[in-house]
Amino acid sequence: MTNTLEEAGDLPGRFSDGVGFVNGQYVPIAEAGVPILDWGFLRGDATYDVVSVWRGKFFRLDAHLERFYAGLETLQLDAGLKRGEIESVLAECARIGNLESAYVEMICTRGQPRSGSRDPRDCQNAFYAFAVPYVWIATLEKQESEGLHLAISDIERISATAVDPTVKNYHWLDFQRGLLDAYAQGAETVVLTRADGTLAEGPGFNIFVVNGDRVITPAAGVLQGITRRTAIEILERFGVEVQQEPLTLDVLHGGLEVFGTSTAGGVLPMTRIDGERVSDGTPGPLTMRVREAYWALHDDPAYVRAVADIPTPAGH
Ligand SMILES: Cc1ncc(COP(=O)(O)O)c(C=O)c1O
């Protein structure tokens, strides 16, 4: 089915920007393309997941695969690979790229229809994957020094009745518009709202607010982030009450601390909202404790799996 590390041609640097897995072959990321007629591209008909590799180890790979397979089932997609096979492909992408810390994405698209057909059931679903160097919504230095300036957008996140937000999806036009607005006003990222005016989520992250001695994060209308889950587990271990309930703008603006959670950067302190400082405008103490605990888990055998321990794809 695939070529191996050796067959991929270990030319120095060829794969160092990342590795794509397309049509059963490992290719340098710049050469990894999608057929123009794939409905994943033309119609956003796809689901995906992103797992990190940190210092040679996958973080919560099982949880990411579970979410991916749940999304496939909801969308009636078939990646055509068993869990162990996907694990091997993802590990091989990281190995070929020699990536110690990586952002690793698995994707299943509807694929290409039979010529002239408009029936999604006629498509041969396609599986793609890639690994690139770890992606940061905000670097560790930025997280530790000033934190992020967040804009709140009145652009609505696409309705949960239209696109199930618990299925990781590429319906990002709302986020992209929100980001462009946020950048235009000098902010660094954005959170979109829901039809009822409560907060939804940001491009690639969930949102948390420290409200007195409890923490609030929206539960409805959002992706159930794996980092979100990890932050909730950490907070509960600390004895902090976490309420998963609608998050209003009033509660956000009255918050002692605000942070985001994402596979792309972990626990992200938000220190300004629409130009106004959150508390004294520096990363909050509880946020930083959660963040420290989050990174400590990257050495906990219960949460990680070494890339090197995952078998090479079958047949090689
Ligand atoms: C819309 C959205 N919300 C939240 C998240 C955070 O999820 P996770 O913590 O699993 O990375 C993501 C991740 O990309 C996302 O795309």
Image (cartoon, helix red, strand yellow):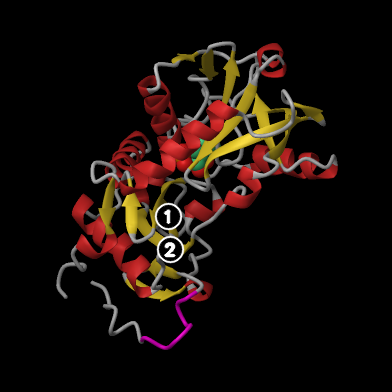
Q: Are marks 2 and 1 in contact (CB under 8 Å)?
A: yes
The image quadrant of residue 93 is bottom left
- Can you identify the residue that label 1 sits on? 105
Q: Main secondary structure of the magenta part?
A: loop
Q: Is-magenta flag for residue 13?
A: yes
Q: CA distance from mark 2 to mark 1?
A: 6 Å
Taking the image as drawn, is residue 168 in sight?
Answer: no
Residue 145 placement (x, y as % from top left) = 67, 44
Residue at x 66%, y 39% (from the top left corner) = 175
Residue at x 62%, y 48% (from the top left corner) = 138
Residue at disc 2, CB closer than 8 Å to ligand 1: no
Image quarter in which the N terminus is found: bottom left
- Can you identify the residue that label 2 sits on? 131
Residue at x 35%, y 34% (from the top left corner) = 74
Taking the image as drawn, is residue 6 in sight?
Answer: yes
Q: Nearer the viewer, residue 203 or 125?
A: 203
Secondary element type, mark 1: strand
Residue 25 placement (x, y as % from top left) = 34, 73
Which of disc 1 and disc 2 is earlier in sequence? 1
Give the residue type at disc 2. Ala
Residue 210 placement (x, y as % from top left) = 58, 19
Secondary element type, mark 2: strand
Q: Which contiguous range is marked in magenta?
A: 10-16
